[in-house]
Structure formats: C-alpha cells, structure tokens
Image: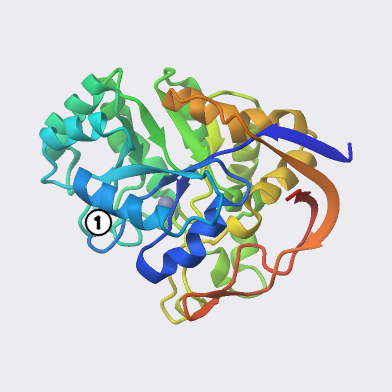
Amino acid sequence: MAKITLIQPDDWHLHLRDDSALATTVPAATRGFGRGIVMPNLKPPVTSVAEAKAYRDRIIANRPEGSNWEPLMVLYLTDNTRTEEIRAAADSGFIYGCKYYPAGATTNSDSGVTDIANIGDVLETMQEVGMVLQLHGEVTDETIDIFDREAVFIERHLINLVAQYPTLKIIFEHITTQQAANFVSSAGDNIAATITPQHLLYNRNHMLVGGIRPHLFCLPILKRDIHQKALIKAAVSGNKKFFLGTDSAPHTRDSKESCCGCAGCFSHPAAVELYAEVFDKAGAMDKLEAFASTNGPDFYNLPYNNTSISLKKESWEIPSSLPFDGSEIIPLAAGNKLSWRLES
Ligand SMILES: [Zn+2]
C-alpha cells in the first residue's frame, strides 16, 4: 500500500493555550484535522459560555487563510459551576462538552473540582441535556503512586459515577492503562475513551532508561509496556468506543528541560502520521479511519467531515525544533523518521 485516503480526521482533545501562542498552536492544530475539541484549562479557566465564545473568536482569528477547521469548545467544571450555565452551553451551538479535572491533577487544574459530590446537580443536568463529560481520570491523593492514579480513579470514582448517572455520556480522556481500556470496553455505549499518540508509541522505559527524556513527560504519565500494548490493541480493534485525541500541549523547550519540567507533548506537527505509524506496525491500516475519523463524530452525534486526507508512503523527518511564541518548542518524536506523510 503506497497511499491511503481517509475521511478527514478530527482531534477530540487538544490544548491551544491563548493570546500570542495561538499564532503557532492554531495552524498546527488544523494540520490534517477537520475539527478539534479545545481544552479549557487557561489561566483563568474557561468556565462560562461567554468566555468560551470569546476564546473561540480568538482561535478563529488565528486560523490559516482558507481553513475551515472548527474549534469545538468546552467548559471547565469547578465546584461553583451552575446548572444554568450547562443549559446555556447546550443551547450555544459551539460548546460540545464539559471537562472535569480533579483539582491539581495537571497543567492549570487548580480550579478543578475538589469532590465529585460538589457537582451532582451539574452532572444531572448534563445527563438530561446530553452534554458530554470529558474526564481527566486520575486521583490526586498524594498517598497514591503516580503510576497507579488512573487505575485507582476507576475504582474510587468512575465505577460510582457511571452507576449514579447511567446515561451520562462520558469520555475517559487520554487513557494510559490496561485497566482503563478494559473498563471502557466493558461499559455501556455512553462510555468512550481518547488515546494519545505518545501513549501508543512509548512506555515509561522510553522516558527513563538511559537518561531522562523530558519531552516524553506527560500526564497521565507513560506506563509499563503491558499498558502500551493494551492501548494499541484497543485503538486498532475498530471498537467504536476508542478514538483519536492527541492531547497535544505546547510547552517551551526551557519549561520542559528544567529542574521541574512541565507535563505535555506537542504532537500536532506530525499527529496523523504518528498514529499511522502505530496502525501500520500493527497491520491495521484498515482500522485507522474508524479511530481517526468516524468513531469520534459517532460518539458526539456529529456528522463526518465531508472532506478527506491522503497519506502516502514517504520517509520524512519530524523537525528537531520549531519556533514558538518568541521561544522554541520540541515536538513529540523530534528528529525521528516517519514512513507516512500527509499529502498537502
Ligand atoms: Zn489534555
């Protein structure tokens, strides 16, 4: 196979940051994708319909000439989110989900929910109006080892949440473990998961053996190879519950290569190709379109894109560094050779 054509994919989880960063992150996010779910963890976070509208306008202003890429906006849930805001979001026509961050779990999550019990009425309303809940599924309990935080979240919170809100649509974001893949597979059709390229391509050995590689540090953190294998199996299975969400998150080189480096991988410069490498290696290129282009819209009840992309078999190298907002950024898999390339 020298070329493959797909319905245009979408990215169901990404970070753009704000202001001058948008000049880099927005064009990067449009590369290969028709739409993107834009995470709301700005400082301060996007917690209202009005803030989401203003942020959307700033994003659109940075879209490349002629691009029809569509930002799908998200509200950030806090202990103080009101049910009226959820209803207004559902009516807005541009908000497609609400994000739950346990307070303190990841970048700019300090305003997140301190206890799921605090947002019971909000979840009830989301269930009623069909608003998707996007979950960062990790506990923040400091006594729990960082490698176990996702699995413990399932046991302590997710099982109860699903039982309490049986028709709430939940996306377990950026899953990293066999336990999460199994949980989602065996749950009802209202539960799905996104998977990042880094969790499919790497395990914690890649990050830690022979020297620490800060550009592979992300949250939830890379796990053992058995988990990586379980995620690959889920992604290439064709199961409609699993779909593409890069979690592409820009941090400057110096904020990653630091004594206290930031979590996040900037994968947009080669996102579609990085996934293609995984599917090709697994002998499952025929399942790439479901994962990248149709499972996500099916879950969100949105039409497929009426455009397409082609990938051709061609060796190329991901840039080792890119300019970013007056500084420099190191993309995921910088300097690596890929065997598939997006046709422009
Ligand atoms: Zn994220």
Q: Is residue 27 above or below residue 228?
A: below
Q: Which amino acid does label 1 sit on?
A: Pro
Q: Where residue 166 sits in the image (x, y, percent)?
A: 29, 18
Q: Which residue in the structure is indicated by mark 1?
A: 45
Above or below, comparing residue 328 to residue 80 in the picture:
below
- Residue furthest front as drawn: 66
Q: Is residue 82 visible?
A: yes
Give the secondary structure at mark 1: loop
Residue found 56% across the figure and 68% down from its top: 215
Q: Nearest the camera: 260 or 248?
A: 248
Closer to the camera, 55 or 276? 55
- The image position of residue 288, as x and y in percent, is 69, 34
Determine crowd level at label 1: few under 14, some 14-19, many 20+ residues with C-alpha closer than 10 A.
Answer: many
| Residue placed most toward the observer, 177 or 249 | 249
Compared to residue 251, the image places residue 231 above or below, namely above
User: Where residue 5 sits in the image (x, y, percent)?
Assistant: 75, 34
For the view shown, which residue lies furthest in the right direction? 1
Residue 99, compared with residue 159, is above or below; it is: below
Residue at the (29%, 28%) spot, across then down: 131
Q: Can residue 48 be seen in this view?
A: no
Q: In this view, does 316 lie to the left or right of 79?
A: right
